[in-house]
Image (cartoon, helix red, strand yellow):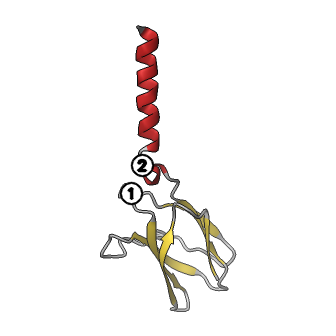
Amino acid sequence: MFHRTACVLLLSLGLLGVSDPAAAADRRVQIVNETGFTMVEFYGSNKGSQSWEEDILGQDVLEDGQSVMINFNDESGYCQFDFRAVFDDGDEVVEAGVNVCEIGSFTFE
């Protein structure tokens, strides 16, 4: 009896683990600044969002040559994100449709 119950429980847990691969995907991405300028703001919004949300860097900046690890898991299940970086010279770069479930690093050049 115990053996059968344990097998059913393990089978159920296994099925839960493979039912939605995107939900279990790692959404951590290393953001790298190789622009020659200081990044003063960074935004990452999922494709379903209508706004840029908040500046992820907050009071911090990302100097040229530096990087930061950002977890884009916002509980939405989305893998496609739009990135927006603002630099100290006033330039702004937008990169649309970045798949954070498939990449581990993204470089602004």
Instruction: Give the quadrant of the N terminus.
Output: top left
Q: Nearer the viewer, residue 80 or 70?
A: 80
Real-space Cα distance between discs 1 and 2? 9 Å
Q: Which of 31/88 is in front?
A: 31
Tag 2, which secondary structure? loop
User: Which of the two discs, 1 and 2, labels the residue nearer the N terminus?
Assistant: 2
Any part of residue 43 in sight = no
| Disc 1 to disc 2: CB gap under 8 Å | yes
Amino acid type indicated by mark 1: Gly
Query: Which residue is identified by label 2?
Result: 20
Q: What residue appears at the point 37 percent right and 55 percent down from the top-left corner?
A: 75
In the displayed structure, 81 sits above or below 94; it is above
Q: Name the residue under label 1.
A: 77
Q: Where is residue 68 in the image (x, y as percent from the top left)?
A: 59, 65
Q: Give the amino acid at mark 2.
A: Asp
Q: Position of residue 58 (x, y in %)?
A: 45, 70
Q: Is disc 2 surrounded by few (<14), some (14 to 19) or many (20+) residues within 10 Å? A: few
Residue 51 point in image, percent of width and height = 32, 76
Give me the residue at 59% from left, 74% from top.
62
- Local packing at callout 1 (Cα closer than 10 Å; few below 14, some 14-19, many 20+) is some
Furthest-right residue in this view: 65
- Report the front residue among 91 and 83: 83
